[in-house]
Amino acid sequence: MSDAFTSQHQVCIAGTGSYLPEKVLTNADLEKLVETSDEWIFSRTGIRERRIAAEGEYTSHMASKAGAKALEQAGIAADDIELIIVATITPDTLTPATACYVQQQLGAPGAVAFDISAACSGFLYAMKIAKRLISDGAFSNALIIGAEKLSSFINWDDRTTCVLFGDGAGAAVLRRAAPEEGSIIATEMGTDGKLTHLLNIPGGGSACPITIDNAGMNLASLSMMGKEVFKHAVNRMKESAEKVIERAGLKPEDIKLVVPHQANLRIIDAIADRLSVPHERVFVNLQKYGNTSAAAVAIALDEANRAGLIQRGEHVVLVVFGAGLTWAAAAVRW
Ligand code: UT7
């Protein structure tokens, strides 16, 4: 599904924010848990360490902290926010939505709040939904958040997954923009439901509730066929980034920064090569945080923004990939 910008109202990113829990889990720490090594993890993924939420710190808490920072940067008070979308696969509870807790925690009683589940692609799915709802005139602003507490859904005995993931949250405020301001120029997203088996959390839903009989089987933990996912990730992210770049009328040299999903440095490097964008114009922070699923691209965007790597009028391309399989991209004039 795709759209070039054709609607009434232009929509800009007015502020970004992120939050990472304090606790750091290094590759050396993981060497004590499973049979692995810093050398294996770093050379295969680029990850050195990740953050782990504290006891009693939930996805909504991280989401609210990231959201508050985005609101502050946008100069919008919580009571003025009209829409909150949280993208997560690790909600506080199956129902109500994590976005409802966030609405309460932020003090945003006027906001319509709901979650979306699109795994690592969730933040850009949320961006497209919010952009469309604002451009159509239904809302004048929105707070979109990617937030995950993946540490609660990891089998800490499984070395093929536990070294990859981390906790955190990233957010952006979208609002109606004047013509001279920046805008989300083009968006793209896609899904391939034939490949649900490649990456999933098999238990804990209605298909496979956790019971006394299966409680010891780690079914409510992430399971991934890494090599297969890798191939699809490179191809889909390349294709969707190319589509938004073309629709936005950009050439590789016009792109100030590509901000990709942070799962594996080898995937990021392969995409940079295929898009003909120099590696120094591709933002990478996965060495610090690992893969934080829906939060990853949002945290990366906030860090790039706050580091001054994207200035007004410059173009940034966001591109993501995750379970579903799902993928998405956006071209933004800052
Ligand atoms: O965010 C959603 C999207 N997710 C992704 O994009 C992830 C995509 N996939 C990947 O990033 C990579 O496939 C992984 C990092 C998950 C794995 O890297 P790989 O190069 O595909 O390794 P592999 O799975 O083929 O495993 C190679 C070897 C195996 O041993 P044998 O069979 O060759 O003897 C594994 O058992 O490495 C072994 N291995 C490990 N060794 C040390 C697997 N995990 C570990 C580990 N430490 N943590």
Image (cartoon, rainbow, N blue to C red):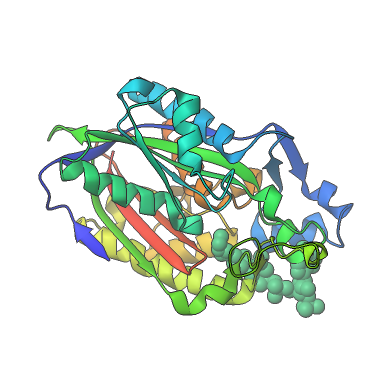
- For ligand 1, the image quadrant comes to bottom right
> Residue at coordinates 70% horizontally, 41% vertically from top-left?
52
> Residue 166: where, in percent of width, then height?
65, 48
Q: Is residue 4 above or below residue 85?
A: below
- The quarter of the picture where the C terminus appears is top left
> Residue 152: where, in percent of width, then height?
70, 49
Residue furthest out toward the bottom: 194
Q: Is residue 155 above or below residue 26?
A: below
> Residue at coordinates 76% horizontally, 63% vertically from top-left?
218
**Residue 290 visible here:** yes
Q: In this view, does 96 lie above or below 75?
A: below
Residue 12: image quadrant is top left
Residue 224: image quadrant is bottom right
**Residue 303 visible here:** no
> Residue 163: where, in percent of width, then height?
73, 56
Instruction: Judge left or right: residue 168 versus residue 110.
Output: right
> Residue at coordinates 50% horizontally, 56% vertically from top-left?
120
